Amino acid sequence: MTAPRTLSHNDELERPKPDHTVSPVVERHTLTPAQLQERSIISNSLVPRPEVNAFRDLRTRLQATADGHNFVTLVAAVSPGSGASYVCRNLAAAFAFHDTRSAMILDCNPYHPSQHTTMHIDPVRGGLTDYLRDAETDLADIVYETGVPRLRLIPAGTPDEFGGEYFSSFRMHLLLDTLRNRYPARYLLLDGPPVSSGPDARILADLADIVVLVAGYGRDNPAAIAQAAANFDPNKFAGVVFNQGV
């Protein structure tokens, strides 16, 4: 695995009663170091490693902007293949390092979902689009263990012709509100489609508190990066992660 090089700056919903439990699900299995490496997931260890430190640093910078509160982070690539899913997955793992915090990834790329495949999860109960499409689908059904303590995944779900149109629905707003308020120590990360692929990243940015843009190092040129960044509210835009080769 390779590390991101740098981060550069530049109807009221009904709120559920907060549950301060770190994780609602007991871990049934924990991945070994070899399995984590196979899935391109960092692990916390006593041996300092550049890629682990890079994600811990990114996590700490984002937390410093939130005044101790949890938040929703959109991670979106400038263009396909820039490695946003890798960054999203490992940033989530870094949040889950601490035993009083947890993290959840929502795969919000209905056109090219990858998190469940990379993490070797079979989404037999469906995923995000199934939940947003069908009011009878229970939230607990679409939350999957990852084998990483305190890290959960909501996979993209069954694709259909509506794709990202679900992201602007009331049910999507209510879902995020429920997830962030039920577990105040849980950080939500949205793995979004590339900015260059259409308007969905911008729609998701409206739901997020923080936006992290991922550029492929040596792949996305400065003009493309600037054009992608211009799609986001400057007050939410945390910066650009330059990702090498993943």
Image (spheres, rainbow, N blue to C red):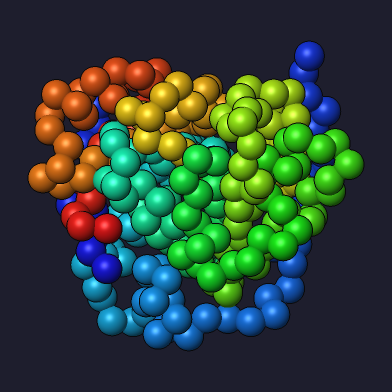
Q: Nearer the viewer, residue 167 or 89?
A: 167
- When the figure is inspected, residue 212 is found, relative to residue 53, above or below; the finding is above
Q: Quadrant of the C terminus?
A: bottom left
Residue at the far top: name it: 11
**Against 143, is 9 above or below?**
above
Q: Residue at x 63, y 66 (%)?
A: 122
The reply to whether residue 185 is visible in this rendering is no
Viewport quadrant of the N terminus: bottom left
Q: Nearer the viewer, residue 192 or 51?
A: 192
User: What residue lies at 46% left-to-right and 45% top-to-bottom?
Assistant: 112
Quarter of image, res 149: bottom right
Q: Is residue 114 left or right of residue 2?
A: right
Report the residue that reaches farthest toward the right: 136
Residue 220 at x, y percent in the picture: 17, 37
Q: Can the viewer see residue 232?
A: yes
Q: Which one is in front, 26 or 229? A: 229
Residue in the image at 40% along x and 59% along y = 90
Reply above or below: 23 against 241: below
- Residue 183 is left or right of residue 50, and the answer is right
Relative depth, front residue between 52 and 79: 79
In the image, residue 51 lies at what x, y percent?
A: 26, 65
Instruction: Return the residue found at the far front.
Output: 161
Q: Is residue 178 left or right of residue 5?
A: right
Q: Residue at x 55, y 60 (%)?
A: 116
Left or right for 28, reference 188: right
Percent x, y of residue 132: 73, 36
